Image: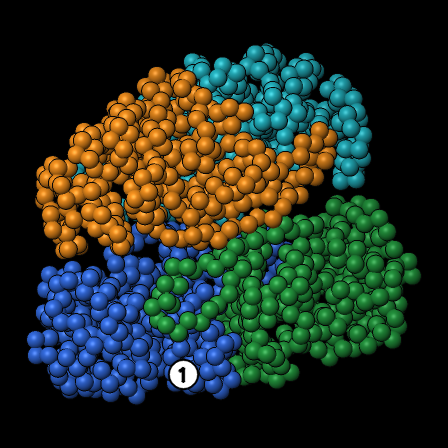
Chain colours: A green, B blue, C orange, D cyan
Amino acid sequence: MNIGVIGCGYWGPNLIRNFNAMDNTTVVAVADKRKERLEFISKQFPSIKTLTTEANEILQSPKIDAIVIATPVSTHFPLGMEALAHGKHLLLEKPFTATVEQAEKLIEEAEKRNLRLMVDHTFIYTGAVQTIKKYIDNGDLGELYYFDSVRVNLGLFQHDVNVIWDLAPHDVSIMDYLLERKPKAISATGMAHFDSSIENIAYISTYYENNLLGHIHVNWLAPVKVRKTLISGSKKMIIYDDMEPSEKVKVYDKGVDIIKDKEQIYDMRVQYRTGDMIAPQIDLTEALKKISQEFYDAINENRDSLTDGKAGLRVVQILEAANKSIKANGKVIEL
Amino acid sequence: MNIGVIGCGYWGPNLIRNFNAMDNTTVVAVADKRKERLEFISKQFPSIKTLTTEANEILQSPKIDAIVIATPVSTHFPLGMEALAHGKHLLLEKPFTATVEQAEKLIEEAEKRNLRLMVDHTFIYTGAVQTIKKYIDNGDLGELYYFDSVRVNLGLFQHDVNVIWDLAPHDVSIMDYLLERKPKAISATGMAHFDSSIENIAYISTYYENNLLGHIHVNWLAPVKVRKTLISGSKKMIIYDDMEPSEKVKVYDKGVDIIKDKEQIYDMRVQYRTGDMIAPQIDLTEALKKISQEFYDAINENRDSLTDGKAGLRVVQILEAANKSIKANGKVIEL
Amino acid sequence: MNIGVIGCGYWGPNLIRNFNAMDNTTVVAVADKRKERLEFISKQFPSIKTLTTEANEILQSPKIDAIVIATPVSTHFPLGMEALAHGKHLLLEKPFTATVEQAEKLIEEAEKRNLRLMVDHTFIYTGAVQTIKKYIDNGDLGELYYFDSVRVNLGLFQHDVNVIWDLAPHDVSIMDYLLERKPKAISATGMAHFDSSIENIAYISTYYENNLLGHIHVNWLAPVKVRKTLISGSKKMIIYDDMEPSEKVKVYDKGVDIIKDKEQIYDMRVQYRTGDMIAPQIDLTEALKKISQEFYDAINENRDSLTDGKAGLRVVQILEAANKSIKANGKVIEL
Amino acid sequence: MNIGVIGCGYWGPNLIRNFNAMDNTTVVAVADKRKERLEFISKQFPSIKTLTTEANEILQSPKIDAIVIATPVSTHFPLGMEALAHGKHLLLEKPFTATVEQAEKLIEEAEKRNLRLMVDHTFIYTGAVQTIKKYIDNGDLGELYYFDSVRVNLGLFQHDVNVIWDLAPHDVSIMDYLLERKPKAISATGMAHFDSSIENIAYISTYYENNLLGHIHVNWLAPVKVRKTLISGSKKMIIYDDMEPSEKVKVYDKGVDIIKDKEQIYDMRVQYRTGDMIAPQIDLTEALKKISQEFYDAINENRDSLTDGKAGLRVVQILEAANKSIKANGKVIEL
């Protein structure tokens, strides 16, 4: 299967490396507006024949079966529609699109032409998230209470999108995948400390049925890198710390007993830990390797992928609502 | 100076120990409705003559100069008013009162009678917070951008107050002390997973002038204990981790350069750390020791204390607004 | 049972508190050469009638059934012999004695008079060590390979004993209890940086049958406090970190496959983690509470205690050999 | 400058990448006995013309100016002598040679022919070690007391060398570089748990003038990866933790006051931290990049490199003595 890649900034080379590593796929063409990036790619991947500044060369090439788009989000929709129009299967970088409307149109177009539409929600394919998913699906956590995620660091300020569009797609896609339900409402708080129109810190709250609460803190202005998610249920609680080299997921066999008698409560302080903690072994395969495989398989088996357009749409719906809430000073947005 | 203590649950004994340890103060009487607590106190502090189940014995005793109230918040106001009425100086446990109105009345009453009114905002007296205060007041952090605090653990569910009234007074009092300004508006999100009326998880956002943002996460349902505060300014950033045994405060000499050229931005990923980190030596004196001293000095010098009634009021205003916002589904409350 | 305590420095008050907390035992007399310590005790424990600077008052008192000795190690033997001579059961602080000969004499004397002789090897009674012991005794670790312990901090330099006699008794007693075997030989390295005769850093190696190796690093001159023990077996490995607030014991389901083919070895780097890690729930009861109970029970049931004189002797044998090795420039000492 | 690389196992590709990244050097030939490795290299570096299983093709090629040898240590000497005989400058992987005698002969040969002889002591070129070196050379640490290094993990068992030859070269080269003195004597302890002749755990003690003590723990059988070095002086102490993502070096402004009075000593326990801790910003440039540059510069400027043959020799002397001591059951080996 011949792959064309459009956009070779920070992430592009990783996509190329993984599609070239697979037996059944080869990256035959790469497009980027920046000549210096193309030179860099030619050094890194001398086997790639077509290196062009014109995306159309790839979008329209009859030799190409599938296209990977890793350009700024504002270009995802036009490039994506053009690719579909030429009968190409599509893998788009996250976030899927800049608006819900664009997402819906891409999905409709892909379905009409029976082409695969997939979004690179990388974390869904990590061993850590896959392990957490098993615990939740097995019912080990019991009834879910909340999902709390923190993704902060001294980040690179984007000039086109705010911190929500830059970092939150990771947390939102993980939350969407693990909880498997759509929020009833969303509210968000954010602040732009440098460019009045681009928030560099934001907090998103998502409200689900049955008192399930979601909360995400994304931040470009923190002194240390934090990637930490708390998931609490009635039976067990999970801490997912992506900065941990080996024990990324810790499952706590902890519950809560509500004791009215104050004295006993104070005793409880001592018996803090109520059960074992287990850090399950995690598959450390590179997520992008699994994504490339899933993209190929979905095309081959003519089926939806694990992170298809609909998954991308659900994420964009939450991002769009969060931004709407910020512009409305934290107003709760019903979905 | 003779001290009477009303309420001897978890915190009471610590207050007694510290007031007894001071030269100029002695705890002469203790009141608690629970006989078994009084027996416990008599074993621990056999020197204390008066042990009673009747608070009035203390409130009205002519031998007593000052009263410490460590009872549930709902009783702070009636007990406090009675104490002031009998000309006693007052140290109240946090939170100061259950409502803003109660706080204002206590302050008014104390001023009318020229009596000291002090709130036990313990953390303000820790070496950690005092150290951070110095950095902020020196201007080392530059313009303040945000204050983000997380205080979560597998906590004891209270049957009278929610997690905001239980845990947030710590963070709110620290935030009020460090930032030295009042929020323009407040919004909060919370959820009650067990008792429909008592939230066990909550997020509070506070909006200040000049884009300064505050955010607090309090939670009774987390598998591990977290006490972490991020304070970010234009010049430096601080992480205050109260769970660290020695290096509780870390000051990062980090800033942000906004580079439009994408390539350079990706290079920036490598040059992540932009300056030294310093963990200043911190005074480890027990905070309660300093509080007892401050209470005595304020009375002696007939002056306001570092955490006087007005400080207590400012904290209660935020707590009350946060609860109001939760009841209104996260509505922003102007102050 | 009436208890007398001789020596009330840092540890004494904890012993008193625990023996007073037990139903069947009461501390009736305390001796310390330092008047200010006796005053401190009288404030803390006003119920104690006899407070004296003369140990003999306690050693010879007919009202006293058992004696706890928490004095410098050099005095353990004479005080202990005198106590036994007066028919008192004995609990001695660690290290048991200053020499192997003294230990043997105390054991002999206690057996002759059928009196209990117990050593306060505190850590043996902690939930952490008890949990590790279970894993080892169950055979979960398989064949034991090594025991490596590090106990360092910015410590208080003793003027009478070196760092081995001060800190190593903890590690050696834990090692003796967990491994349940005696070393064939011992070698040690140490250095005195201040007082030429008192080592402030030392490394002890203990050699057992079947290639089992023990190693202990004790150090008064480290910037941070470390209390970390590695125990490795053919099936599982344990890390015991006493500085961890909750997860003190971590059991790693890890083994080693020896792959000759270099390529595969490099692959192995990726599959580093070969199984789950579990941090078992640990009993957080204060060790001293269990020690007091065990001392009482051993006397009551006329049986040896978990950490009897023989355990104390085995520890002193290793400490003595380690010091002998240091004086002989690291010479291996056969036992 | 044309570079030839002999040996392309785990480390080889990194060397090739860095020498190709430099302007003035190009890797023109690579030799490895394993055809699959050569194929791997041809994919990764298609620009390299000569790929051969015959080292001699490189050793004797007139087009090649300098040779990098990354083969098992047993082959370093014969390959190195052959390379020098053909007038090639040499960069050898660590450890430099399998014996002191081989090291001396290589140095002699290189000097005779005025060729550069350099050893890849990678860590010397890291920002962390360079930063520590500055602190020591500035005298900030005062008189040096000890160097304690731990390098353990679930390691790949080598079939040709033991854990000392595999891991200790890192610690020994760092120690040699930082302390800038040669030990008077060495002793070591080790154990082979699988192959009777190949130790998988070892402890090395190095004795210097003025009571300076060195100690290294290397271990292939630990459940977690530890890379931690303690360096203590009379004025300051350093912890170098290579597993820390950003704050690898921590400098503690801590000293020791020897207080004879026990009471005060116990007070000291509370005032544990005696000064600030600083984590200096560290240059994160890849060490191999600096090594390639240093190799080129040393050749170009016809001067010794920072890690020349003599540095390699000093490291091998310690490794050889440590192994001799292990075979002699921990006997102290005078140097």
Give the answer, above or below, for where D328 lies relative to A198.
Answer: above
Residue closest to the far left: B63
Q: What residue is disc 1 on? A: B321
Which residue appears at 84% of the width and 72% of the height?
A110
Which residue appears at 74% of the width and 52% of the height?
A289
Which residue appears at 54% of the width and 28% of the height?
D201
Give the answer, above or below, for where D154 lies relative to B121.
Answer: above
Give the chain letter at badge 1.
Answer: B
Compared across the picture, whether A99 is left or right of C63 comes to right
In front of the other: C82 or D252: C82
- Quadrant of residue A139 within the rendered picture: bottom right
Question: How far across and how far down the image is residue D1, in percent?
Answer: 68, 29
Give the answer, above or below, for where D210 lies relative to D244.
Answer: above
Compared across the picture, whether D66 is left or right of A250 comes to right
Question: How far across and how far down the image is residue D113, in percent?
Answer: 62, 13
Which residue appears at 44% of the width and 44% of the height?
C130
Residue closest to the far right: A62
Compared across the picture, whether B301 is left or right of C16 comes to left
In front of the other: B117 or C327: C327
The answer to whether any part of residue D137 appears in the image is no
- Number of numbered labels in the structure image: 1
User: What secondary structure is found at the residue carrying circle 1?
Assistant: helix
Figure quadrant of the C terminus of chain A: bottom right
Amino acid at pointer 1: Ala
The answer to whether any part of residue D260 appears in the image is yes
